[in-house]
C-alpha cells in the first residue's frame, strides 16, 4: 500500500475462506463460477469507504458511480456523465463540460449540474477526510453555468486536468444531508453507474446488482460479486474449485493454470511498482549513504526473473522504463562492490557478524510486508537477502495494515503504487515534502527542495517539454538521493473462465494502476460481458 487516497484494509485468511462459503452458497453455480447472468471474482483488498467524497472511484471504473469522463480500452478519455469532451480555453485554465441529459441516480433522482459542483466543492472542503485533495490543487472553483453546463476554473494551466474528471460524482440530495465523513452514504452509496450495491459484508464480499435504468444500457451481467480474499493461495484454490469466474493472482500462481481446461490467463501492463520505503526518521534508512547503497545492492533483474517469472521489469523509480516519461540513463545496475564502497567511505564498518555499524548504530531496520501477500513477501525476502551481502540487515516481518501503519514513521514497508494516467498523479503524492507522513502519501517522509520545485513546475504548465524536463530532474535526483528503493514494475496476471465474451471477443485488460483488482482487471467493463454461445 502506498500513496493512494483509497486506503485499503485486508481481511484475514480465515475471513477470505468464509467469504467463499458465503459466495458459493448465495450464488447459483454451474461449476464455473456464477449463473449465466452472474459473475464472481476474487480480489485482494477492499475499500475503506464507498463514498467518492472520501476517495472511492477517483481513478474511474467504479461500478456504482460515473465520472464526467471515463476511459476506453486503450485508456483514452471519452464522455460519461458529460455529453462530450470538455471545451478548453486557449490559456488552459477553463474547462467547460456539457452534461448528458436524462441521467438518473439509481434511486430515480435526476443527475444535475448541482451534483458535480457539490462533489468537487465537498472534496476540497478542509473538513472532508479525503487524502487526495492535493490531486485537485489546480482547481480554483467549479460553477454551474446552467442546468446542463458546468465550468471548472483553474489557478494555473494543469495539463492532465481532464484526467481528474473521471472522479465519481456523488448525489447532493443524499450525501449533502449527512455527515460527509461518517454518514450512511459511506457504506450505502447511491450513484449513476451500471450497478447498485446490494450488500457489503466487510472483509468478505461486495455484491452488486444491475441498474436496469443505467444511462449506458442495462448491464448484461445482472449480478456481480467481488469476493475479498487477501491470501493469494486461497484465491487460487477457490478459483480452481470453481467458486470464481476470475481472480487476480501473482505470476507464479497464475502460471499453474496454464494447462487448465476452460481457463484463460490475461496479463495487464501496469505502472504498478513494488518498493521499500526508507523512513527519514530512522537512523539507518535516513542516512543518504545507506539509501544509495541499498539502491545498488538490490538485484532487480533477479527479482523479475525469479519472483515475477518475467512478468514485469526492473523499477528505478515510479515511472516504468518503457514509458515516454522515463528518463533514459537513470537505470542502476546491480553493483554490490560499489554499494560496499559507499558504505565504507561513509563510516559504516562491518562487524564480526557481517552487519555494519557507525557511531554505535547498527545497520539494521525492520521491514514490514502485508500478511498473505506472497508477492510482497518474496520481494521483502529477496531485498533482505541482497542487502545483507552489503552488510545491512533488514528484519522482515508481516502484519495487517492496522499493525503496520503505526510503525511507518520509523520502519520500512514493502509498498506499492503507480498510476498510468499522468506522472503527476503518482510522483507528487509519493515525493512532495508537504505530504510527508500524510497517511500513505510520502511514506518515506522524503524532503528535497529540488524535487519539490520540479514537481510543482511540472504540474503548473501544460507545456509537454517543460513537464518532461521537470520529471527528468525528479528522476535524476532520485539517483543521487533515493527516497525509496524501487524494485520491480509488476504485470498484473488474471485467470478467468473462458466462457465470457464482450463485443466480438473475450474480456480484455487496460493499462493498470496499483489496484489489487478492485477497479481494474478484465472486469473493468463487466457490464458488457455475456456468455459465449
Image (tube, helix red, strand yellow):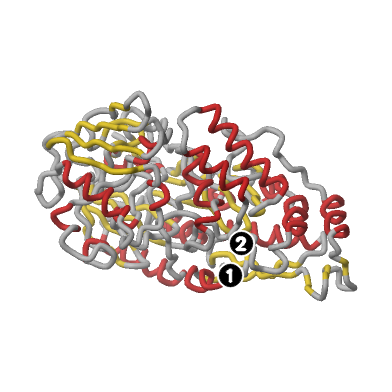
Q: Are marks 2 and 1 in contact (CB under 8 Å)?
A: yes
Binning the other alpha carbons within 10 Å of mark 1 as few (below 14), some (14 to 19) or many (20 upward) gives some
- Residue 380's label in the rendered image is none
Write the residue at 49% across / 49% down.
Answer: 514
Residue 380 lies in what quarter of the image? bottom right
For disc 2, the marked residue is 377
Q: Secondary structure at mark 2?
A: helix
Residue at position x 31%, y 32% in the image: 94
Quarter assignment of residue 472: top right
Q: Residue furthest bottom?
A: 360
Q: Which mark is residue 398?
A: 1
Asked whether residue 493 appears in the rendered view, the answer is: no
Residue 354 located left or right of residue 486: right
Residue 501 x %, y %: 33, 35
Q: Is residue 343 above or below residue 507?
A: below
Image x and y of residue 425, in percent: 47, 44
Is 257 displayed left or right of 315 in the figure?
left
Pinpoint residue 491: horizontal percent, then vertical percent: 55, 43
* Residue density around tag 2, few if under 14, some if 14–19, many if 20 or more, within 10 Å: some
Of 36 and 400, nearer the camera is 400
Tell me the element at label 1. strand
- Mark 2–mark 1 Cα distance, whole angstroms, equals 8 Å
Query: Which of the two labelled residues, at mark 2 and mark 1, occupies the earlier sequence position?
Result: 2
Amino acid at each position: 500500500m502506498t500513496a493512494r487516497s483509497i486506503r485499503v484494509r485486508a481481511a484475514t485468511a480465515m475471513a477470505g475462506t468464509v467469504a467463499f462459503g458465503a459466495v458459493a452458497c448465495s450464488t447459483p453455480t454451474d461449476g464455473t463460477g456464477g449463473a449465466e447472468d452472474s459473475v464472481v471474482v476474487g480480489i485482494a483488498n477492499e475499500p475503506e469507504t464507498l463514498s467518492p467524497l472520501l476517495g472511492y472511484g477517483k481513478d474511474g471504473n467504479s461500478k456504482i458511480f460515473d465520472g464526467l469522463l471515463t476511459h476506453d480500452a486503450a485508456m483514452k478519455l471519452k464522455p460519461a456523465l458529460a455529453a462530450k469532451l470538455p471545451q478548453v480555453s486557449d490559456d488552459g485554465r477553463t474547462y467547460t463540460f456539457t452534461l448528458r441529459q436524462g441521467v438518473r441516480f439509481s434511486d430515480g433522482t435526476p443527475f444535475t449540474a448541482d451534483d458535480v459542483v457539490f462533489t468537487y466543492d465537498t472534496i476540497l472542503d478542509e473538513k472532508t477526510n479525503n487524502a487526495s485533495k492535493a490531486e485537485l490543487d489546480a482547481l480554483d472553483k467549479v460553477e454551474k453555468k446552467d442546468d446542463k453546463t458546468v465550468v471548472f476554473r483553474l489557478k494555473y494551466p494543469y495539463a492532465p486536468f481532464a484526467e481528474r474528471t473521471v472522479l465519481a460524482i456523488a448525489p447532493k440530495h443524499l450525501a449533502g444531508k449527512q455527515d460527509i465523513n461518517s454518514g450512511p452514504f459511506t457504506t450505502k452509496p447511491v450513484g449513476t453507474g451500471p450497478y447498485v450495491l446490494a450488500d457489503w459484508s466487510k472483509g468478505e464480499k461486495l455484491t452488486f446488482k444491475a441498474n436496469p435504468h443505467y444511462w449506458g444500457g442495462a448491464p448484461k451481467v445482472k449480478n456481480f460479486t467481488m469476493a475479498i480474499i487477501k491470501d493469494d493461495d486461497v484465491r487460487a484454490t477457490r478459483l480452481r474449485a470453481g467458486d470464481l469466474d476470475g481472480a487476480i493472482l501473482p505470476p507464479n500462481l497464475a502460471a499453474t493454470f496454464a494447462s487448465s481446461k476452460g481457463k484463460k490467463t490475461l496479463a495487464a501492463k501496469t505502472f504498478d511498482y513494488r518498493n521499500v520505503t526508507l523512513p527519514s526518521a530512522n537512523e539507518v534508512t535516513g542516512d543518504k549513504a545507506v539509501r544509495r547503497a541499498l539502491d545498488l545492492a538490490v538485484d532487480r533483474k533477479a527479482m523479475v526473473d525469479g519472483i515475477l517469472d518475467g512478468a514485469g521489469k526492473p523499477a528505478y523509480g515510479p515511472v516504468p522504463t518503457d514509458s515516454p516519461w522515463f528518463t533514459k540513463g537513470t537505470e542502476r545496475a546491480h553493483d554490490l562492490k560499489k554499494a560496499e564502497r559507499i558504505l565504507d567511505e561513509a563510516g559504516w564498518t562491518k562487524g564480526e557478524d557481517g552487519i555494519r555499524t557507525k557511531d554505535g548504530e547498527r545497520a539494521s531496520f525492520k521491514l514490514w510486508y502485508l500478511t498473505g501477500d506472497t508477492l510482497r513477501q518474496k520481494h521483502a525476502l529477496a531485498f533482505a537477502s541482497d542487502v545483507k551481502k552489503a552488510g545491512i540487515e533488514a528484519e522482515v516481518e508481516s502484519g495487517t495494515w492496522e499493525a503496520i501503519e503505526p510503525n511507518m514513521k520509523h520502519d520500512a514497508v514493502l509498498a506499492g503504487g503507480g498510476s498510468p494516467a499522468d506522472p503527476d498523479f503518482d510522483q507528487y503524492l509519493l515525493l512532495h515534502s508537504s505530504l510527508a507522513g500524510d497517511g500513505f502519501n510520502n511514506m518515506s517522509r522524503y524532503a528535497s527542495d529540488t524535487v519539490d520545485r520540479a514537481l510543482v513546475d511540472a504540474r503548473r504548465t501544460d507545456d509537454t517539454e517543460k513537464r518532461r524536463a521537470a520529471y527528468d530532474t525528479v528522476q535524476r535526483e532520485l539517483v543521487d538521493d533515493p527516497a525509496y528503493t524501487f524494485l520491480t514494475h509488476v504485470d498484473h496476471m488474471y485467470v478467468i473462465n473462458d466462457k465470457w465474451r464482450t463485443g466480438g471477443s473475450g474480456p480484455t485488460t487496460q493499462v493498470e494502476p496499483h489496484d489489487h483488482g478492485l477497479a481494474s482487471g478484465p472486469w473493468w467493463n463487466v457490464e458488457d460481458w455475456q456468455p459465449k454461445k
